[in-house]
Image (tube, rainbow, N blue to C red):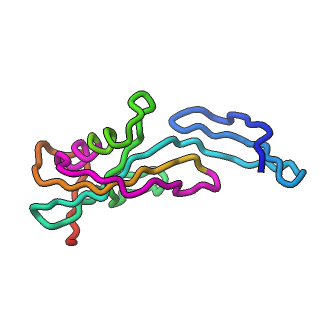
Amino acid sequence: MNIKGEEILHKGFYTFKKLLVDYKGETLEREQIDIGRVAAALVYNTQRNTYLLVKQYRFGAGQPLQEIVAGMVDNRQNDPQQTIRKEVEEETGYRVDRLEQLMDFYPSPGASTEKVYLYYAEVSQKTAEGVGLIRSMKR
């Protein structure tokens, strides 16, 4: 496949594009949502022997969801590790003691450019109130 052209349909929080794709001599139209990069973490509280999930309202689902900690990587700082440390503290109120990158992946590559950098984070000391409603899940 070869992208022959693109048109920006909407530029807001996300960018929506129409692509013209050459596939075996045939021109196809495809839509693409340009989301960017995301840092996410499975957060484990070593003192309580539990994983921490946060509950936040998500527009795509139209309801609050329990999820792992995640946040958009700011293109200015360009560092997923720095992003996830900040997000863990903001969403849970815990400072990261240990951080290990597990993998990176594209969760929906058929239509989205979103790339997720997934980490395992260990926490033990609460330093502030988090903005997400926390739920603990036994290991």
Residue 55: give x, y in percent of width and height: 30, 56
Residue at (60, 54) in percent of width and height: 109
Quick one: quadrant of the C terminus? bottom left
Point out the stretch of residues depicted in magenta: 87-111
- Confirm whether the magenta stretch covers residue 65: no
- The quadrant where residue 49 appears: bottom left
User: Which sits in the foreground, 9 or 108?
Assistant: 108
Which residue sits furthest right?
25
User: Which sits in the foreground, 60 or 87?
Assistant: 87
- Confirm whether the magenta stretch covers residue 108: yes
| Residue 8 drawn above or below residue 47 | above
- The quadrant where residue 129 appears: top left
| Residue 46 drawn above or below residue 86 | below
Residue at (38, 42) in percent of width and height: 80
Residue 93: give x, y in percent of width and height: 17, 46
Q: Is residue 22 left or right of residue 97?
A: right
Residue at (49, 55) in percent of width and height: 105
Which residue sits furthest top?
76
Q: Count numbered badges in the picture.
A: 0
Residue 88: give x, y in percent of width and height: 25, 47
Residue 121: give x, y in percent of width and height: 25, 54
User: Which sits in the foreground, 11 or 111?
Assistant: 111
- The quadrant where residue 7 appears: top right
Q: Is residue 10 left or right of residue 88?
A: right
